[in-house]
Image (cartoon, rainbow, N blue to C red):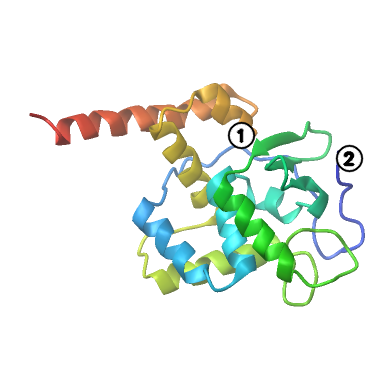
Amino acid sequence: MALSSPRTDFPHITGLETPKREKHDRAHLTREEYTKLLSLAGANPRDYAILQVFLQTGVRVSELCNLRIADVDLVSRSLLVTAGKGMVARTIELEKKATQAIKSYLAIRPTVSHDFLFVNRYGEPISDRGIEKLITRYVKEAGLRKKVSCHTLRHTFATHKAQQGISAYRLKEWLGHQSLETTQIYVHLGEQNAQKEMEQTSL
């Protein structure tokens, strides 16, 4: 599958950037909280697909904005993600929920002159800011009091996977981390959660 070329046809949107060091804020959503967001977005195929991709793959917002239609393989259920200029692309397996959400969105995606996966109401590739506003709106409608950003959804993916026992090496591949040390933070969070659960269920 060919890699996507940097954006040149939409000069108002910045190109791919090398991923920055992960933020120290590790806030994440509980199952109840992210379920509220998904429920509210359920009537909008595009928004629902965006949320599902975040929650089911843990991609960065810049990576999501730069996804092309050709990067999605609905047959093998995988997503090709390019993390920055000169960096190696990675493939992330898609869960059934994300696959179906993308399929439903593609069925109503408007016909436009480019192949970026997610578009705004003007038919242009959706921007980082556009997605951030989308997340902020749903968080407000859901009545969540904590500060939630696109990065929070990435943390939610990683934290829940770590709590389910996914290895740091596998998480590193999915998240596109350059250092295993960065990924280990999520594993430690998962271990702390396991200890808490043990205490709460003490006989």
Q: Amino acid at mark 2?
A: Ala
Residue 175 vs 117, above or below: the answer is: above
Measured as percent of width and height from the top left, residue 114 is found at 88, 63
Q: Which residue is mark 1?
A: 174
Is residue 20 positioned above or below 100 on the image? above
Q: Is residue 88 left or right of residue 57?
A: right
First in residue order: circle 1 vs circle 2:
2
Choose top left, top right, bottom left or bottom right for residue 101. bottom right
- Distance, label 1 to label 2, CA atoms, is 20 Å
Q: Where is residue 78? Give x, y as percent.
A: 69, 41
User: Is 115 on the left-hand or right-hand side of 64?
Assistant: right
Q: Decide if residue 40 is on the left or right side of residue 7.
A: left
Q: Residues within 10 Å of mark 2 (few under 14, many from 20)?
A: few
Quarter of the picture containing the C terminus is top left
Which residue is at 61% across, 34% downward?
Answer: 174
Q: Residue furthest front?
A: 75
Report if the CB atoms under discs 1 and 2 are less than 8 Å apart.
no
Count residues near mark 1 (Cα–Cα under 10 Å), then give few for <14, some for 14-19, many for 20+: some
The disc label shown at residue 48, or none: none
Q: Which residue appears at 11% of the width and 30% of the height?
A: 202
Q: Quadrant of the N terminus?
A: top right
Q: Residue at left 39%, top 27%?
A: 188
Q: Give amino acid for label 1.
A: Trp
Foreground residue among 120 and 165: 165
Image height of 153 relative to 18, above or below: below
In the image, residue 137 lies at what x, y percent?
51, 72
How many marks overall? 2
Residue that mark 2 sits on: 2
Secondary structure under the numbered disc 2 in the rendered image? loop
Whether residue 107 is visible to the viewer of this picture, yes or no, is: yes
Which quadrant of the figure has residue 194? top left
Report the side of 11 relative to 152 (left or right).
right
